[in-house]
Image: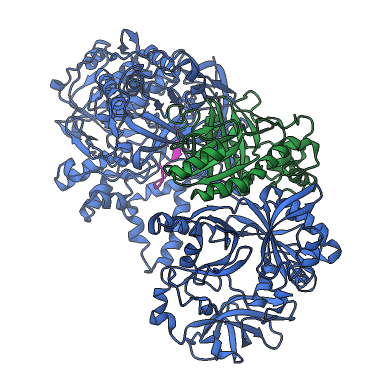
Chain colours: A blue, B green
Amino acid sequence: MNKEQTHRLGQGGAIDRRRVLRFTYDSVAYQGHAGDTLASALLANGVHLIGRSFKYHRPRGVLGAGAEEPNALVQLERGARTEPNERATQIMLVDGLVANSQNCWPSVRLDIGALNDTFSALFPAGFYYKTFMWPPGPRWWLRYEHLIRKAAGMGRTADAPDPDHYAHRYAHCDVLVIGAGPAGLAAARAALAQGARVMLCDESASFGGSLCTSDGAIDGAAARDWVARVQRELAAHPDATLLEHTTAFGYYDDNLVGLLQRVQTAGTAPFVPRQRLWKVRARRVVLASGAIERSIAYANNDLPGTLLADAARIYVERYGVRPGSRAVVFTNNDSAYASALALHRAGIAVAAVVDARPEADLHGALVARTREAGLPVLAASVVTKAHGRLHVRGVDVALLSRGVQSSRHIACDLVCVSGGWNPAVHLFSQARGKLRFDANLAAFVPDVSPLAIVAAGAANGRLGLDEALAEGHAAGSAAALQAGCAAPTARAMTADGADGAVGAVGAESTVTADGAVSAVSAVSTAGAVGAEVPHAQSLRCGPLQPLWEVASRDRSAKRFVDLQNDVTVNDIALASREGYQSVEHLKRYTTLGMGTDQGKTSNVVGLALLAAQLGRSMAEVGTTTFRPPYTPISLGALPGHAVGAYIEPTRRTAMHAWHAERGARFVNAGLWKRPHSYPQPGESEFDAANREALNVRTQVGLVDVSTLGKIELQGRDVAELLNRMYINRWDTLQIGRCRYGVMLRDDGIVLDDGTTSRLGDTHYLMTTTTVNAVRVMQQIELLLQRDWPELQVHATSVTEQWAAAALSGPNARAVLEKIVDIDVANAAFPFLAVAACQLRCESGTIPARLFRMSYSGENAYEIHVPADQGSGMWEAVMAAGEPLGIMPYGTEAMGTLRIEKGHVVVGAEADGRTTADDLGLGKLVNAAKWCIGKPLLERPALTAPDRWQLVGLSALDGAEMPRAAKLVADPDAALPNPMLGHVTAWCFSPNLKRWIALALLANGRARHGETLWAVSPLAKVRIKVRVEPACFIDPEGARLRV
Amino acid sequence: MSESQSMDTSAPGFPAIGASVPGRYGLTTGNGVTLQDLHVAAAWNLQGDGSDMDFAEQVRRVFRVQRLPDVHGIQSTDRWSVLWLGPTSWLLMFRMSEVTLPDSSGTGDASESQVGAVVPSAAQSSKAARTEAASAGVTSSDPASRGKTVSRAHAVRDFAASRDAINAAGGALFDVSASRIGWKLAGPRAATVLNSSCPLDLHERAFPVGSCAQSLFGHVAALLYRQGSAEFSIFVARSLAFDVWQTLCAASAEHGYEVLAPVPFR
């Protein structure tokens, strides 16, 4: 036995006593056992005081044993792995675990913030809104909020990247069963028996739910043995996926359910994710999430040493922990008697069972057993107040009929409270299910949902074991039937299929507490799981008597409704008096249920108190909206592996490795990485781009243009399609020639530009801009399928098929002549010619398509080769060009070259507002034919004389062109200074040796020669510019045709 | 291994993973899945009206495919596997049955080919890039890739004639051989690995052997083909292959995985 674990019972519990795990809480070393949660291990060491409350900094201890826990929130682990607001009741203990308390300074026992409690009269409901509303305006509130948040303390986030990894998995099933208690297990086995694919998850580290602490019997076996048997049967079935420690946190459209599987407490086991986010698409969902016990609001009901009655039983029976030595049980229903008996069996003195109900209602079987055991039962009595500072030391008990005057003190160090049970309807409500108030349970229960979800067992208000089993079985069976699984063993696996099913579902890796990983294989006989309804003996039960609050003689003593957000009975009364009478207003004003626990133990109590204040029924008051997640989930689980460099996919061209090796700086173009420039050692990107651009005009350069969109078109009517899509004419294009074209949107604005080549009689290749590749392809598919199905045209994207490079400059032909097998002399292969050829490379020849087209304004060629040979092509061209002064150039130099030529870019000049005429391309619009967008070109606004038109700008006086500038006539004019236009692209022209720009300018083509000002108020820069035609170099285009 | 170590794959939140060179990676106690580069000699996109007699007849004549596959289906001849892509679109993938790649174990070079070509690593030598080009080269002189070369040449010789024949019947044939990169995933965890990023239901009843589908792998469009109960091929756009490969490895790591030498598509 372990000496440290002073509050560990000598026997019992589902823990492995041979395995001792060391952990620290608030820097104190403790020991626990495998199978413990952090909460049970702390209790086993006699540690109840776990943290301080949110607002008043009152000492708080563990209240529950599961997801409902409002108090025991801890800061888990340290450094980059630290995570705030983790529920100690759901953290499985691992060796070396480190956790710390939150909301307290300097320590949890001596906390300065507790002064808030002393002066709590100053902090009523809505305190913040009342106090921090002056001076008016949001600026001050933002400052206050910063301080308030710091004072409240909600744990700390890590300040370094999370070193753990989080995985995702998609899964499909016929029936998803949420919760593996009696109803869930019965539902899963019934659904499986009908041949359904079943997933079963439970947020606990082991299955069984309430059966883990049940002393009942099912089908003649002890409840725990029945759980083990059913779990074995299910695990052995290839069509069942069992997920322990997995919370169903969100219910989304069409039965998409989000599950969070806690694979390991901290990511210490290599390769295994810390958590896994499951996206489960279920045909039907059975919600067997059980019920959550609620508390009763009596004075000081938040003292450490106060447990929900069922949680106390769980700590005793499941974890072998002695949560106290002398207990008072306070209840308004029968279920707490089972806890009293469990404490008694474990040797814990039960000073009294205080039951609010009259003697006449105490006829249940458990009450009788309690009395037989000799435990004192005080009928028609209530606990009015608890005493103690850091731990409960006694309670005042009074007779309901005689009021607080009758109170007497009972010494105890443990109070077990049960105010009844709330079905865990959260996911049902998320599934847009309607709730109904059940007066017998004094709780909201599921009614109907438009989605394929049904609640069963305690989640549906069936608290008895036998009825939960029966309802679970029926729900599972019905769900399988509705999912289309009609007959048992109808789909027994064939010998052929048995192998394959292993990979699809079933087998799951599990990580044991010390991080060891074991693969639990589900390979086994696809045996018939019993289809019969499981039975348990039903217990005679007395009725519940709703009891939400108990008045106290001490008016200053707090009676808590919401322990996490420190909302008291008086706060709710005050809010109601101040007019916050809708549940949604009450929630926001008092923060009731707005903590990380979403009011699992408090909401219904708060609603009942509001209803009483307003004199309305619970059904009239209604509930607030339940939203995902059911319990908080780690942010890391949401992106999974899509983090860092993988946050979005990256596209790389076939020549990417070459660029990277040559020191290319990359720039994002959509998802693509494109070389921006290739700086040499010691060279700036600016100098590199200028060197590259100059070299294209003087010698020859090579640029990777693989990212341009490429669409291949085949069919009798391709020319007709092109005629309809482009503003210019295409039926005149000859085989072996290409042409530049512009496409419009329906409204006449420029959509995209590019070239299309005629490769064969009915065979064309269209290129688009990088950014519009997908959009144009979608447009073509839409037009062909929806608008013009009569056109015989087939299209496919070949962007990925072809790697492309543009070879540009006066020496381009000389380079090409060395490596291609066709005559590229000007006469044989003129401007806008297209041909197939073979390219000689080091290891052989590569089939290529050669296009004589130019973006730089120099004599230029595009070379397309199959992408798997892109790097071979690139290296061959670079090798051939070496003696001729070839340099690779990036997008920056390409931009400089096109600005010098006044070529427009979609996104810069064609910015979604410009027409072809604005861009100086109006002459391309063919008057003789219709095309998309043409009719609306006639709109007056698109032909107005003051349209902004493309012009060139030269900076005067050697000035540098500012980044982003507007054009004005007089920079000193009174504001608002009329804006004549704006700069769309600017660069230093290494060829002209001055800063130049392209701009859109009102009536710009008529203003050539004028001097204007380019001003950038943000950068406080203003320079004089001269308006020029939008082409600075070789305006006749002679260089293209040499 | 040098390639893998120089890659920036150790981002926080991403499990440490291996390279594309053959070897065992990830969890040492498991061997859940094997990953292999797939060499595709030729992949042609066939489009047309499957119900048109002329077109169907021409497809039969040119490719000896008796019947084009239905939704998510596959039809195979000794030369071609025809994958359904859409109501009027199919992918013909050349089955390299008559010639096979030589066993490349021990050479290292061949295994670097497909993924290596898109690795953005400074350590990725141009030698690897040359190898890539060579191994796919139509008239390569590299003996290590002769098998593939022959198949590719064979297919390419046929392409223009096949296209003209299909065009004549109102259909279309596009050469997309280099558009996609593919891998073969095999082993008890193959479907699980795919489902880490692919939302398809891969249960054998929902996605039986011999089906194909276009879906997603993470953010990336992917073409899946189930060749066996625990054997899949996945194809993605070439430009995205590096990312997808890393993601596949990351998803495989927790099961333990083995990278095997490349295999030709069959």
Quarter of the figure that contains the C terminus of chain A: bottom right
> Chief secondary structure of the magenta span?
loop
Examine the rendered structure and indicate whether residue A955 appears above or below residue A596. Answer: below
Residue A338 in sight in this render: yes
Tell me which segment is drawn in magenta: A49-58
Looking at the image, residue A814 sits to the left or right of residue A522; the answer is right
Of residues A361 and B93, the one drawn nearer to the viewer in this rendering: B93
Q: Which residue does the image show at 53% across and 70% down from the upper left?
A: A742
Position of residue A315 measured from the top left corner of the image (x, y, whole percent): 41, 23
Q: Does the stretch in magenta take in A1033?
A: no
From the top left corner, tell me how far across and down residue A506 is, in percent: 47, 23
Q: Is residue A56 magenta?
A: yes
Q: Where residue A875 appears, x then y in whole percent?
A: 78, 54
Q: Quadrant of the N terminus of chain A?
A: top right
Identity of the residue furthest to the top in this view: A220
Horizontal side of A375 relative to A674 (left or right) equals: left
Of A142 and A216, the residue lying toward us: A216
Instruction: In the rendered view, tell whether residue A890 sits above or below residue A409.
Output: below
